[in-house]
Amino acid sequence: MGLIQKRFFCSEFPKKWAVKQVTKSNFAESLEEMKGHISSSDFVAVSLQKTGSFSAPWHRPLPFDTAETAYCKAKRAAERYQLFQVAVCPFSVDSSKLVAYPYNYLLFPRDELKVGMPCYSFSCQTSYLTSMAREGFDFNACIYDGISYLSRVQESEAKVWIGSPRSSPLVVDSTSSPSVADNIFSERIKSRVLRWKNACKKPKTSTNDALMSSLRKLISGSEYYESRPCISIDVCSEHQVQLALEMLREFSDELVPVLIPGKSGGTQAVRVVLTSSKEDKDLFERELQRLEEEENKKVRGFREVIDLISASQKPVVSYNSLTDLTFIHSKFIAPLPPTLDEFASSLRHVFPNVLDVSHLMKVIGPLRKMTNVPLAISYMNNHFFAPVDIEIPYQATENESRIHGHNVVRISHLFAKLCSILKIGHSSTTSDNTVLSAPALEEYTNVFDALSTSSEESVNEDVGVWTKSTRKVSCEQLVFLWGFGGGKTAGKLKSMLNNSHTIFSKEFDIRFVDKSCAVIVFWQPGLAETFIDVMNNIEEISGPLREMVSEGLRAASYETYERVCKLDIWEADLAESLDKALEDPDHLTEANPIVTPIEIHWSGDSMINYNDL
């Protein structure tokens, strides 16, 4: 019955929730609408439809993961899988009313510019594709009419590859004195530009004069940019670019510099365009700006939406922000950095304020066990009085009201309900009409930022483990165990260990991570290290434990598990990954200190259900 109820909540949605469906054909017009809605809203919720998340049970974030190992897992998923849909919902909350503008964007990583980007291949999980097909996802529309995109880094590379001219930036006067070489370079190009400009403007009085004028232009290197005369100044460095632009300011009433990118990056030449009048100069600069904007839209694609959200500096609301934002960073910003600290630092430049609904849910104890948004909303409807009316001004067609993107409305709805229940944004001195504001949510903003500490600090990280009640332990109290043979339950394995060595006479607990590996929690500090030392000295082992070791039993510390994640040893079985990490010749080298302390709660619902494997 519980399973049926879960399916009901995951698929049911009110018909009044009108979500605008956006494809390549209507993307341009929707972009202007989105810009206005973001500007007038207080928050922006996002929800992603991915082609997969993890390829083995232990690859998913687990309760005993530290912030760093959880990031490694999220990073791998973001680099491996693709986004087919991104739902974006600017919204505002005023007392018990939520005004939302949901959009669902259909994406496909198409190489429209023929530059080998954004990608040639990606992975899919059959379970994800099956679920999307059941929900009526149109794979043909995705492939043929999905919006492509390039990340910010890929855009820079593509523009270099394409070689499109761009307008020159604002020139700042140099604070250092020019060198002799700088003066020679500036005077040489100034003389050349003057001769060329005079030759272009000299009136043609006869056929011979016209011929001589043409020869002069040819010798000086004169060309045409569209219908206007131009000349190219070759440069060897960005410093020479600045020198050329500084010199050309003397002729700014007639000449317009255009930068020509080189194939290997940087600037290859400064093209100087001669205009006939001030009006013609203004017209040319507007044309240049329009062409740049058109090319930017073509190159950026859906990333224009991400840039709009970033430019607005509005708080971004997500459910499971680490997963969502690693995908967004990987696809639309830049390749993911190797560590969580670097990721958080990079993300702050794009989205300075991130609110994770799943973190807010943890404040209400029973919601910690909720695994999806609809179930959380249902629980709050049954146990709290926090009515929130949803208003969506957009009127969808009948077809749009039945399809995708509704989860982003649910996230906005859940966020508003949580804020109402937790009294966030409302103090005793405020009225009921107070608009929910970002400063009131500062305590709940950028939660994973708060996990970061200096890499120079060495701290023991606490993780949560599953018992009859939630308890916190240090990572140093965890040991991974494998090679114990198949067909065993956690209880049976614990009984075997109880009788194998005196170290197991103390309190400990054990749970399976996957079918090949279990994790042991020693509640008395220091016992985990002692057990690892025992396992590393086979000659001194006796009794039942020696027999188990001879049959293949192995053990490793949490540092080994952390190294598995950092080295990207993602085998299907955790046992095989741990074996490979121990075979690494550097495994005896002292590992980097574990940083970024985090409290993780492990409940029975978090354990792996072997029926799903």
Image (cartoon, grey):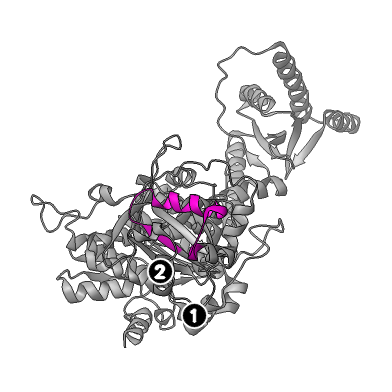
Answer left or right for 49 relative to 377. Answer: right
Query: Which three-letter amino acid code belongs to the residue tagged 2?
Result: Lys
Given residues 415 and 550, the one toward you in this image is: 550
* Count of numbered circles in the view: 2
Does the stretch in magenta take in 540?
yes
Looking at the picture, tell me which residue is in the foreground, 110 or 419: 419
| Location of residue 145 in the rendering, given as x and y in whole percent from the top left corner | 59, 72
* Residue kind at label 1, given as amino acid type: Ser
Q: Secondary structure at mark 1?
A: helix
Q: Residue at x 63, y 58 (%)?
A: 118
Residue 248, quarter of the rendered image: top right
Label disc, if present, on residue 343 of the rendered structure: none
**Which residue is drawn at the image coordinates 23% and 68% (left, top)?**
366
Q: Residues within 10 Å of mark 2 (few under 14, many from 20)?
A: some
Which residue in the structure is indicated by mark 1?
Answer: 131
Please state the horizontal and vertical placement of residue 434, each as a whole percent of the image. 16, 55
> Callout 1: 10 Å neighbours few (<14), some, many (20+)?
few
Which residue matches tag 2?
A: 494
> x, y percentage for residue 249?
61, 24
* Residue 372 can be seen, yes or no: no
Q: State the extent of the magenta-drawn residues as a range.
A: 519-545
* Circle nearer the N terminus (2, 1): 1
Residue 171 image position (x, y, % from top left): 57, 27
Is 115 displayed left or right of 486 in the figure?
right
* The image quarter in which residue 269 lies: top right
Location of residue 190 with respect to 552 vertically, above or below: above
Placement of 69 over or under 136, stated as above or below: above
Residue 533 is covered by the magenta coloring: yes
